[in-house]
Image (cartoon, rainbow, N blue to C red):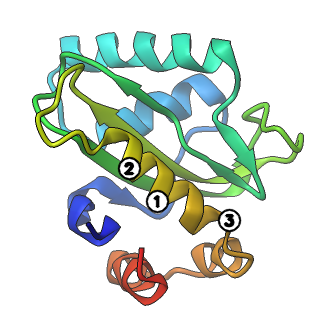
């Protein structure tokens, strides 16, 4: 399983406009192109998950994730906010890079946790935050995933 196969160009945004956590989550959810009701449900689910503890894992990276009936298969998105946003990350630093993962409650392929693990592994690479910061286009993001072999 390669992470690259889960990301589609239309779910990659290299310059988010939002300046606070809630608006940023809504903008991230928007990348999945769901209907308005589904977006609202997903926002509530992600907020509930964030209230348990921030998904900001440090080094400028957050991985908001949840299971929800609003999707019928695993969906992922990546977005960047150059200036960074206070996401209550574990290192108390602003978050610049966001990986959204949403999966249905039951999935035959059971990819949710492996994908979450692969993104966390990718994020731990010391070179990754610097490389994500200088991406010029979506293809460069996809190429980086391939180069890192995750």
Q: Which mark is residue 69?
A: none
**Quadrant hosting residue 130:** bottom right
Q: Quadrant of the N terminus?
A: bottom left
Residue holding disc 2: 114
Specify the quadrant that holds the C terminus. bottom left
Please provide percent x and percent y for residue 77: 35, 50
Q: Secondary structure at mark 1?
A: helix
**Can you say whether 50 is above or below 111 in the image?**
above
Of residues 93 and 75, the one nearer the viewer is 75
Instruction: Say which label, 3 or 1, has the lower sequence index.
Output: 1
- Is disc 3 in contact with disc 1, using a CB cutoff of under 8 Å? no
Q: Nearer the viewer, mark 3 or mark 2?
A: 2
* Nearest to N terminus: mark 3 or mark 2: 2
Find residue 89 and report its horizontal and vertical position in percent: 78, 38
**Residue 93 rendering spot, x and y as whole percentages:** 86, 47
Q: Are marks 1 and 2 in contact (CB under 8 Å)?
A: yes
Q: 10 Å neighbourhood of mark 3: few (<14), some, or many (≥20)?
A: some
Placement of 147 over or under 27, stated as above or below: below
Q: Residue farthest to the right? A: 92
Numbered mark located on residue 118 in the image:
1
Label 2: state its secondary structure.
helix
Query: Pointer 3: what residue?
Result: 124
């Amino acid at each position: 399983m390669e992470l690259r196969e889960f990301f589609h160009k239309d779910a990659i945004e290299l310059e988010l406009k939002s300046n606070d956590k809630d608006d940023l989550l809504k903008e991230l959810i928007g990348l999945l192109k769901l209907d308005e009701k589904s977006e609202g449900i997903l926002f509530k689910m992600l907020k509930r998950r964030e209230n348990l503890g921030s998904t900001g894992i440090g080094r400028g990276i957050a991985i908001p994730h949840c299971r929800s009936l609003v999707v019928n298969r695993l969906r992922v998105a990546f977005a960047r906010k150059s200036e960074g946003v206070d996401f209550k990350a574990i290192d108390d630093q602003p978050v610049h890079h966001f990986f959204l993962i949403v999966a249905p409650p039951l999935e035959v392929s059971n990819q949710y946790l492996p994908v979450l693990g692969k993104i966390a592994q990718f994020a731990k690479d010391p070179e990754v935050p610097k490389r994500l910061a200088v991406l010029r286009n979506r293809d460069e993001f996809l190429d980086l995933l391939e180069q890192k072999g995750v």
